[in-house]
Image (cartoon, helix red, strand yellow):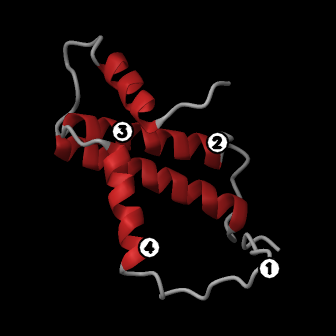
Amino acid sequence: MERKTIQQMQKEVDDYIGQFKEGYFSPLAMLARLTEELGELAREINHYYGEKPKKTTEKENTVEEELGDLLFVIICLANSLNIDLQESHDQVLHKFQTRDKDRWTRLETGEVKSNGND
């Protein structure tokens, strides 16, 4: 599968939503959807990595699927507000690289970081 840029993903979602008379939901409705999707992601994380196993009657979702749902709603919200997510990403990364540059302990040269699942 071809890798897409953030701009390509935003255009793809905009083209999809543009097919429908209803268009984008209001920002407040999308915030509610974002909260709903975040809750579904939290539930999946809890099932896979927490102490609460799935019931046998529950649908088998994946963390990957829930992250995809969350990303879709974030893109919809950004598009509806005319926000370029690449610019948003660049701004926040700049903030981390400047304001927060000394906040975390840096790895030593050659040191391999843990992904938290060791």
Looking at the image, is mark 2 or mark 1 earlier in the sequence? Answer: 2
- Please provide percent x and percent y for residue 108: 73, 85
Q: Which residue is mark 2?
A: 61
Q: Give the residue type that dot 4 points to.
A: Gln
Task: Say if 52 sits above or below 21 in the image.
Answer: below
Q: Is residue 82 left or right of residue 116?
A: left
Mark nearest the camera among 2 and 1 is: 1
Q: CA distance from mark 2 to mark 1?
A: 35 Å
Q: Which residue is mark 3?
A: 75
Residue at the spot 73% in from the left edge and 69% down from the top edge: 115
Looking at the image, is mark 4 or mark 3 earlier in the sequence? Answer: 3
Circle 2 crowding by C-alpha within 10 Å: few under 14, some 14–19, many from 20: few
Q: Is residue 107 visible?
A: yes
Q: Which residue is mark 1?
A: 111
Q: CA distance from mark 1 to mark 4?
A: 20 Å
Q: Residues at badges 4 and 3 in contact (C-beta under 8 Å)?
A: no
